[in-house]
Each structure stands twice: as structure tokens, then as C-alpha cells.
């Protein structure tokens, strides 16, 4: 009963906060406003901790639960039984419905070949394994929360995984000066939708653990649409003429972390991969 009371109190508080935000932003044309969305200076208030709840980090397409895949070239086959036993459930892939519209990735033939090779060797090739920055849009749907800090001058996104960050410029910064893991992002408001265009990527990040990849020509257009105080509908359109025959899109809801004292933790995973990446350089390797 106490839990029910707390939940009711939280709902009432949330409704009250949304009402205050609506009143404070009354100068905005009511015809373009999304109901029950808190506002900051007339725009939907994206400030807060958010997280995707899906299996896209394992595979952005629909997939069944399965064991980890073999770390050798050639046809994709289940790992030998001894490796399955060694990894146990930790190495298994949870099933998921996928987040790609139409559930099809329009790879060029040579890019599809590379994807299959990546998938067969993901335990040695996936950048996540080595704690490299996740790239965009993968940073959004990894199994970690991220925080949006919004002001009139800029929007800043910080991710729990590997301390990744993004500065979203609200004035066009011009062409990217250098290719990077997270790219260069330029944001703008289209009504109540926050649109972010990002380019200037390197070609090293993946979309998931299934080996889906891109080139340094990739451009990502994201759309953040608040549907109510605690949900954002997220869309990302991928354009990469070197890898895909046409643009394609993924979409998913993002959920506000509303537990008491919710805060962004630290997952500085680089300290966990030192032995994996450099252990072979020891004068006397660990047993």
C-alpha cells in the first residue's frame, strides 16, 4: 500500500509539474504545442536522464535469442560447445523485434560481405568490446542511460558508457574539421521536434554487435519528439552512399529515468580492457 501511495504521489507531482510548464510557456502558439509536454523557454524540455529499453545494441534487426557467434572467418556458425559453456548466458544474445523500419538494411554487395565477416568475428572486432566510443546512433540505445542538458545556447548529451559526450551546436559550425567517433552535430527546432544532423564520422564504429557497419561518408539525421513528460520518440535516418544503396531509418521510444535520486553513473570501461588489448605484450603473460 505504501508503494501505491508513493506511485500516486509521483504521478500527481508529474502532472503538476507539466501543468506549470504549460502555463509558463503560454506564449507559444497553442496549435503547434504537444499536450502534456514540459517546456523550457517555449520549447519541449528535454532535460533529464533517458534510456532505450530494447535489444538494438545486440542487433538492430529482428533476431531470435542465440549463443555468441564464432570468432573465425567463413560461414556464420554457432561457437563450439566448449566455448558456449565458457561464456554461458553472459555470451548469449537476447531476442528482439528490431528497430529498423521495414527490418531491411540496403547494403551494397561488398558492404554486406564485410557485415557477415564482422558478425562472425564480433568478439575481436566490435569496438564496444575494446571500450571505444560508441558512435551515433549506437550511443542512444546501448544498455546505459544518457543525460540531455538543454539551454537556449546549446544542447549537451553525456553518456554513461565510456564517458562519451556530444555538443549539439545550435548555430551551424561549418564542415567538420576532423573525422571522429561521435561526429560533429548541428541541431535545430522544427516546431516541437528537435532535429540533429551529424557528420564527420570515422568508419570504425558499429551499429550493433551483429557487425552492422558504415563508412566515413555516413550522415545521421536524428529527430527527438517528446510525446509526454516521460517519453521521447526517437528516429535516426542513416545516409551512407558508400555502404548502402539508399537511406534507411530506425526508431524507438526513449524512457525517462524517474527512480528516486536517478543520476548518471560512470562506466569508464577502458580499465577493464587493458589486459584484453595489451596483455600479449607482457614479458610473462598471465595464465
Image (cartoon, grey):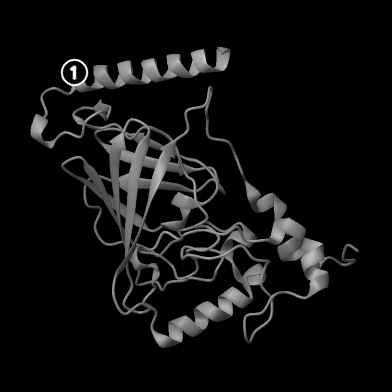
Relative side of 13 to 225, left or right: right
Q: Secondary structure at mark 1?
A: helix
For the image shown, how many numbered marks are present on the structure? 1
Query: Which image quadrant for residue 28?
Result: top left
Looking at the picture, how far across and down is residue 137, in whole percent?
41, 57
Residue labelled with disc 1: 23
Looking at the picture, how far across and down is residue 1, in whole percent?
56, 13
Residue, far front? 1
**Residue 7 vertical position relative to residue 57 in the rendered view, above or below:** above
Relative side of 231 to 24, left or right: right
Query: Which image quadrant for residue 93?
Result: bottom right
**Residue 72 vertical position relative to residue 42 in the rendered view, above or below:** below
10 Å crowding of disc 1: few (<14), some (14-19), many (20+): few
Relative side of 42 to 76, left or right: left
Looking at the picture, how far across and down is residue 33, in whole percent?
16, 33
Identified at 56% across, 17% down, the residue is 3
Report the quarter where the C terminus lies.
Answer: bottom right
**Residue 108 vertical position relative to residue 195 in the rendered view, above or below:** below
Identified at 65% across, 84% down, the residue is 73
- Front in this rendered view, residue 140 or 286: 140
Looking at the picture, how far across and down is residue 198, in whole percent?
32, 58
- Front in this rendered view, residue 3 or 267: 3
Amino acid at each position: 500500500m505504501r508503494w501505491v501511495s508513493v506511485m500516486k504521489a509521483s504521478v500527481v507531482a508529474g502532472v503538476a509539474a507539466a501543468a506549470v510548464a504549460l502555463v509558463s510557456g503560454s506564449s507559444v502558439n497553442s496549435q503547434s504545442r504537444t499536450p502534456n509536454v514540459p517546456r523550457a523557454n517555449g520549447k519541449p524540455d528535454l532535460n533529464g536522464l533517458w534510456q532505450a529499453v530494447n535489444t538494438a545494441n545486440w542487433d538492430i534487426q529482428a533476431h531470435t535469442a542465440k549463443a555468441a557467434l564464432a570468432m573465425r572467418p567463413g560461414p556464420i556458425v554457432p561457437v563450439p560447445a566448449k566455448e558456449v559453456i565458457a561464456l554461458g548466458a553472459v555470451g548469449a544474445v537476447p531476442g528482439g523485434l528490431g528497430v529498423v523500419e521495414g527490418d531491411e538494411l540496403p547494403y551494397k554487395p561488398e558492404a554486406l560481405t564485410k557485415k557477415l565477416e564482422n558478425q562472425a568475428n564480433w568478439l575481436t572486432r566490435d569496438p564496444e568490446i575494446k571500450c571505444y566510443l560508441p558512435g551515433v546512433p549506437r550511443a542512444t540505445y546501448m544498455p546505459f542511460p544518457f543525460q540531455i542538458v538543454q539551454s537556449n545556447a546549446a544542447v549537451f548529451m553525456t553518456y554513461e558508457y565510456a564517458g562519451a559526450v556530444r555538443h549539439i551546436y545550435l548555430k551551424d559550425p561549418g564542415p567538420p574539421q576532423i573525422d571522429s567517433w561521435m561526429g560533429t552535430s548541428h541541431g535545430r527546432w522544427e516546431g516541437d521536434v528537435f532535429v540533429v544532423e551529424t557528420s564527420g564520422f570515422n568508419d570504425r564504429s558499429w551499429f550493433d554487435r551483429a557487425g552492422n557497419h558504415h563508412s566515413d561518408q555516413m550522415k545521421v539525421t536524428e529527430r527527438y519528439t517528446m510525446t509526454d513528460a516521460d517519453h521521447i520518440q526517437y528516429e535516426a535516418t542513416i545516409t551512407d552512399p558508400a555502404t548502402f544503396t539508399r537511406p534507411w531509418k530506425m526508431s524507438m521510444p526513449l524512457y525517462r529515468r524517474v527512480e528516486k535520486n536517478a543520476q548518471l553513473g560512470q562506466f569508464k570501461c577502458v580499465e577493464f580492457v587493458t589486459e584484453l588489448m595489451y596483455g600479449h605484450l607482457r614479458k610473462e603473460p598471465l595464465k
